[in-house]
Image (cartoon, grey):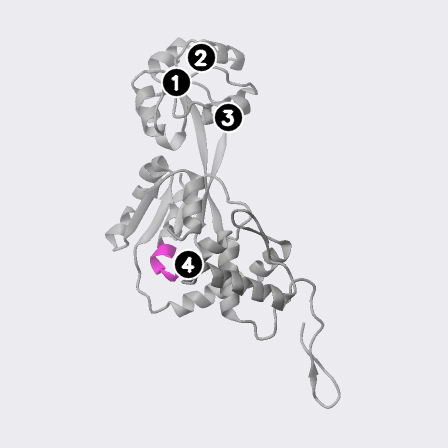
Amino acid sequence: MKNQTRAGGQETPAPATAGTQLPPHADLNLLRTFLAVHRTGSFTAAAPRLGLSQPTVTAQIRTLEQQTGRELFTRLPRGVDPTPHAHELAARIAAPLDALAALEDTAATAGPVHLAGPSELLCVRVLPALAPLVTEGVQLRVTQGLPEPLIEEMRAGRHDLVIATRHPRGRTWESVPLADEEYVLVAAPAWAEHVGGHTQSGDLCAALREVPMVTYAEDLPIIRRYWRTVFAKQHTARAAITVPNLYAVLSAVNAGAGYSVLPRSLCQEHLDAGRLALLHDPEEAPLNTLFLLQHPGAEANPDVSRVRERLQEAARTW
């Protein structure tokens, strides 16, 4: 709302809006510290990102809370939890502060892009998509892992971009849905022929009890989800083989060790070549949305934006 002019040409301030008010001439350093704590969820984690000591971070947050008249964080045994006022303030200042940080770093040259995600997806989809950028001079530093550890490492500033199978909650990450990953029930052709006469879901589930099952984890997360979503049943069988990762599952199933549920992207080539067979083709296969997360301020490196745009473009065909 604009200021109002009264008689004599003097301006009076417009009425304050509801919510957390910034103090006059707000200290940018305090706001930067606040935003780092809000994004990392910890005074301790924010300190090295800011080049400050943890007591200094704590003191600056207390000063900002005094200036705004609001409690911004609830102190927890490990870390802090932003209050609603903190979420409101972060939403107001994040974009301007990130833009200012990018302007301050315009003299910086492009450096390596630190990218992380699931190992199978990186190998099958991501690295082939980014190969043209590498030939143009983009440097990549790639890390594989599970979503939770990678997101925690991103909060600590170790990654510029993370491909995750879920969206982190309660943080102001820049993120976009990247693609939907479809899961398929597969086995070698010999096993497919063995259960081929069982076309109904109930018959197929019963027939598969006679087929060894291959998985990468004892709790069968992907297989149980497939059974629950597609067959509306609980999967109670035990695995015949448990291996370290989905690549090993694919190798064992491809060799005829049994059946499993795999991402289509990982086994499509084997399906096309006839080395694997689709055991079931439901009207709605289970999907898992992949998200591309970007660390705040990472766009100061122009190659981060190039990698992000290339991944978004390539994901349209995944």
Magenta-drawn segment: 300-306
User: What residue type is disc 2 on?
Assistant: Leu
- Residue of label 2: 208
SS state under label 3: helix
Nearer to me, 317 or 241: 241
- Residue of label 4: 49
User: What residue type is disc 4 on?
Assistant: Arg
Label 2 and label 1: CA atoms lie apart by 8 Å
- x, y percentage for residue 110? 31, 61
SS state under label 4: helix
Q: Depth-wise, is mark 1 or mark 4 nearer the camera?
A: 4
How packed mark 3 is, by other alpha carbons closer than 10 Å (few <14, some 14-19, many 20 or more), is some
- Residue of label 1: 259
The answer to whether marks 1 and 4 mark residues whose Cβ atoms lie closer than 8 Å is no
**First of labels 2, 1 by sequence position:** 2
SS state under label 2: helix
The answer to whether marks 3 and 2 mark residues whose Cβ atoms lie closer than 8 Å is no
- x, y percentage for residue 53? 44, 61
Residue 206 as seen in the image, left or right of residue 267: right
- Residue of label 3: 225
How packed mark 4 is, by other alpha carbons closer than 10 Å (few <14, some 14-19, many 20 or more), is some
**First of labels 3, 2 by sequence position:** 2
**First of labels 2, 4 by sequence position:** 4
Quarter residue 239 falls in = top left
User: What residue type is disc 1 on?
Assistant: Tyr
Residue 1 as seen in the image, left or right of residue 100: right
User: What residue type is disc 3 on?
Assistant: Arg
